[in-house]
């Protein structure tokens, strides 16, 4: 064994040990904080993500029910944020809420059992209230951003009460009084006034105006709180009677004005969402699928290992070791990236296992040919690897390209299962370029180095 | 030496026997339903329910009534596995949440449902159209990739066009066999073409082309080594030299695929089955279609493309 091979051997062993360590269920990641400043220098989380089809749960694709162009990207993001808040309130572990394309939101709720409740919670629109803050001028700053309880909430939201973090009116000890809600708003928009101040102009419905007009007339000079989903956003002061609409003044920037206008709108006229596709998977079903495919996978791998050993003998041992290392590296990479494992993703991985020994077969067949044509052992091995390399590279490359096409196809929300398959397959093929060639060659050289004489005398050990 | 290519007409005949029935089934399906296959709701929109009851009581009739009462017209109800599994698959229209809730509640009245084994998929027509569009795009892109790969593989070879065309014909052969198998399964077991079927087909195309290229590579290598030998003999030798590795490689993928087919979950069996058929035909077509076609071409047996002597009109595959 020469020095180059020894270096490769050490590298292969190190990679293998690292991979096995990553795969261990107890491994949560690498967190190194050398200067103990609380900010880790290396912060690598490793956790195997499992797809909804394996853990059970709900996946919903929601589409905006407004014509495209009538809302902006940030409106959509804001809507998604609202959805995320609601989802968090459901207590789901690791929910995903993301904007997809221009007008869609994808929500994934692993482990959700009551999908009816989940979907209705998501679709429910934000509750916007204008709340009477008379006599509260001094406490506005301490209440802004806090949750408060109103009589409207008590009446319309079963379960809402003073218990918990919802503040009540400190002067009366009772819930605050709601004047009007988002239903009474017709529109709201950010506007730049001539004095360069950003304000929010809003229009009331006629029913809203009938309540708001008399109320504002009676409370001029008093603050009025704008409350979204129970949280006080701001509390501007009433300057005049408002019958049809008005202007909210404050220290707004363009951004904050737009944001508040949107929040007002989404109470009045949210970006209504409709369910475009939904998929719910029972938890038992998912677990069964995992168990069955793992069992099938192990069986398949054992047969492949035996085949390589019987058919190629000593080189077969090298190929088997390389295959086991291939599996270990793949599983480690899935945890590190992380790749969310779905059933198609597991199948993609298994097929990559099936094709992982392709490279070895190409190499070993070449070596056999060289040996038969009279080359000596070392030359035959070198030639085998050299000549097979082009075929291995080409075939892996073409399948990687195909999986790239499949990955693009899988970007369509309705065909997302294909993406999982494509990712694991492509990763397998890339890792295979390393294991089938470098790892196998290292082990083969090692074995030839250790057992040169017996191998020369008994060529059947090389599968010839 | 045993000669495979001499029997090439039998292989052409055999392939025709594989492909033609599939084409007929697809044609019938096109005329009766308007599409070549049963299309899954991933493409056309709709809902799919996987129902598992914990006790007897459900029949096709009373399940159907529940769905029809909720305004579903386009229904397909099937029992899965053995009757004692109480497992049903139902396809219906796209429904909103309220309708879906009502259906589940009503089904629960027929017989207790195992809620933790419930699987429901709702796809709106819009999403279906998008998936269809993306699928067309993917197929076109894949065709470019494969063609590009073939052009690249044969760029410095005499008669490159000929090799390329034969590889592509073998590829179409495999696609047709797979499509035929799918249409047959659709007819017999209501299998549906979904995104995974498309995935399997693209994988098959990739494997098929690779297999053919490896074989053609060997033929090219052997031509200068055995100058003076008839083309047929060189080709035969090349097949025999590569058949070991071809079979060894396919065997390993088959081990995995058969294991999944036998012991894997229900939901991916269609995908794996199509892949299995595709890999079989992929290996077969490289040896028994692509290479014999090369020989036929060389010997001027293919009508219209021969320049050396008048075409002897023999049945050919295309």
Image (cartoon, rainbow, N blue to C red):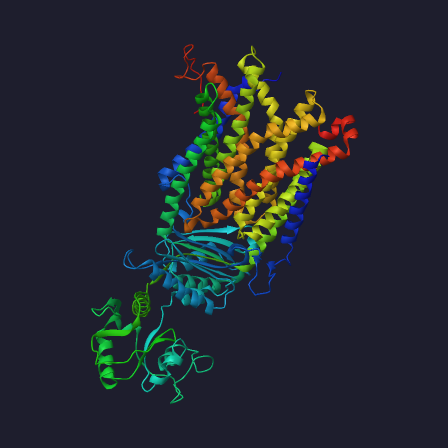
Q: Residue furthest front?
A: A35
State the image coordinates of residue A287 (x, y, percent, origin top left).
58, 56
* Residue A163 visible in the snapshot: yes
Relative depth, front residue between A407 and B135: A407
State the image coordinates of residue B263 (x, y, percent, origin top left).
61, 46
State the image coordinates of residue B217 (x, y, percent, origin top left).
54, 24
State the image coordinates of residue B6 (x, y, percent, origin top left).
54, 17
Q: Residue at position x 74%, y 27% from top?
A: A460
Q: Quarter holding the C terminus of chain B?
A: top left
Report whether B229 appears left or right of B188: right
> As displayed, is residue A252 above or below residue A163?
above
Report whether A321 appears left or right of A190: right
Report whether A275 appears left or right of A326: left
Q: Residue at position x 25%, y 76% from top?
A: A208
How many numbered marks have been drawn onto this rendered protein structure?
0
Q: Residue furthest bottom?
A: A172
* Residue B190 visible in the snapshot: no
> As displayed, is residue B172 above or below residue B93?
above
Q: Quarter holding the N terminus of chain B?
A: top right
Relative depth, front residue between A292 and A294: A294
> As displayed, is residue A449 above or below residue B129?
above
Relative depth, front residue between B119 and A215: A215
Q: Quadrant of residue B262?
A: top right
């Amino acid at each position: 064994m020469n020095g180059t091979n020894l270096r490769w051997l050490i590298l292969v062993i190190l990679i293998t040990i690292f991979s096995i360590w990553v795969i261990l269920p107890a491994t949560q990641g690498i967190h190194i904080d050398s200067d103990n400043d609380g900010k880790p220098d290396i912060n690598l989380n490793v956790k195997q993500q499992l797809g909804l089809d394996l853990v059970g749960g709900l996946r919903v694709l929601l589409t905006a029910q407004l014509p495209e162009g009538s809302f902006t990207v940030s409106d959509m993001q804001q809507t998604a944020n609202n959805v995320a808040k609601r989802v968090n309130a459901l207590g789901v572990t690791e929910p995903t809420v993301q904007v997809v394309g221009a007008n869609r939101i994808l929500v994934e709720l692993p482990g959700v059992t009551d999908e009816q409740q989940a979907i209705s919670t998501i679709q429910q629109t934000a509750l916007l209230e204008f709340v009477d803050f008379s006599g509260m001028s001094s406490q506005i700053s301490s209440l802004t951003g806090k949750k408060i309880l109103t009589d409207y909430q008590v009446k319309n939201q079963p379960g809402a009460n003073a218990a918990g973090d919802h503040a009540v009116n400190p002067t009366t000890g009772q819930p605050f009084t709601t004047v009007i809600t988002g239903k009474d708003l017709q529109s709201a928009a950010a506007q730049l006034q001539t004095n360069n101040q950003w304000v929010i102009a809003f229009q009331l419905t006629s029913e809203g105006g009938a309540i708001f007009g008399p109320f504002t007339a009676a409370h001029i000079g008093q603050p009025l709180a704008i409350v979204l989903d129970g949280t006080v956003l701001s509390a501007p002061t009433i300057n005049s009677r408002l019958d049809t609409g008005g202007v909210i003044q404050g220290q707004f920037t363009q951004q904050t004005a737009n944001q508040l206008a949107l929040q007002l709108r989404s109470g009045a006229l949210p970006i209504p969402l409709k369910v475009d596709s939904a998929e719910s998977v029972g938890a038992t079903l998912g677990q069964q699928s995992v168990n069955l495919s793992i069992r099938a996978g192990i069986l398949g791998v054992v047969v492949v290992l035996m085949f390589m050993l019987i058919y190629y003998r000593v080189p077969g041992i090298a190929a088997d070791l390389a295959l086991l290392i291939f599996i270990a590296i793949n599983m480690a990479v899935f945890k590190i990236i992380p790749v969310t494992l779905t059933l198609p993703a597991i199948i993609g991985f298994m097929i990559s296992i099936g094709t992982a020994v392709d490279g070895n077969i190409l190499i070993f067949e070449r070596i056999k040919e060289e040996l038969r044509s009279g080359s000596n052992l070392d030359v035959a091995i070198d030639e085998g690897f050299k000549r097979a390399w082009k075929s291995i590279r080409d075939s892996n490359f073409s399948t990687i390209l195909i999986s790239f096409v499949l990955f693009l196809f899988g970007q369509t929300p309705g065909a997302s299962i294909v993406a999982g398959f494509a990712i694991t397959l492509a990763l397998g093929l890339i890792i295979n370029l390393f294991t089938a060639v470098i790892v196998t060659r290292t082990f083969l050289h090692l074995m030839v180095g250790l057992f040169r004489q017996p191998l020369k005398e008994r060529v059947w050990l090389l599968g010839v | 030496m045993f000669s495979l290519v001499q029997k090439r007409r039998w292989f052409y005949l055999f392939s025709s026997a594989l492909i033609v029935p599939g084409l007929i089934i697809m044609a019938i399906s096109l005329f009766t339903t308007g599409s070549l296959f049963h299309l899954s709701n991933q493409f056309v929109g709709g809902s799919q329910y996987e129902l598992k009851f914990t006790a007897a009581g459900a029949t096709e009739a009373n399940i159907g009534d529940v769905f029809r009462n909720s305004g579903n017209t386009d229904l397909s109800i099937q029992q899965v596995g053995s009757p004692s599994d109480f497992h049903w698959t139902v396809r219906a229209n796209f429904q909103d949440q309220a309708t879906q809730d009502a259906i589940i509640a009503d089904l629960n009245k027929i017989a207790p449902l195992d809620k933790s084994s419930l699987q429901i998929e709702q796809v709106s027509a819009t999403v279906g159209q998008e998936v269809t569009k993306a699928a067309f795009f993917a197929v076109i892109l894949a065709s470019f990739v494969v063609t590009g790969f073939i052009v690249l593989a044969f760029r410095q070879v005499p008669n490159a066009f000929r090799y390329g065309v034969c590889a592509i014909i073998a590829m179409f052969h495999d696609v047709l066999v797979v499509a035929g198998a799918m249409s047959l399964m659709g007819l017999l077991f209501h299998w549906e073409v979904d995104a995974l079927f498309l995935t399997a087909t693209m994988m098959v195309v990739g494997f098929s082309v690779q297999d053919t290229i490896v074989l053609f590579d060997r033929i090219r290598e052997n031509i200068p080594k055995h100058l003076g030998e008839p083309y047929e003999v060189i080709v035969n030798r090349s097949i025999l030299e590569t058949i070991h590795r071809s079979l060894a490689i396919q065997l390993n993928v088959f081990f995995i695929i058969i294991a999944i087919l036998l012991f894997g979950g229900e939901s991916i069996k269609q995908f794996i089955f199509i892949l299995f058929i595709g890999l079989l035909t992929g290996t077969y077509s490289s040896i028994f279609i692509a290479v014999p076609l090369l020989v036929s071409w060389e010997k001027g047996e293919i009508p219209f493309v021969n320049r050396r002597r008048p075409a002897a009109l023999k049945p050919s595959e295309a």
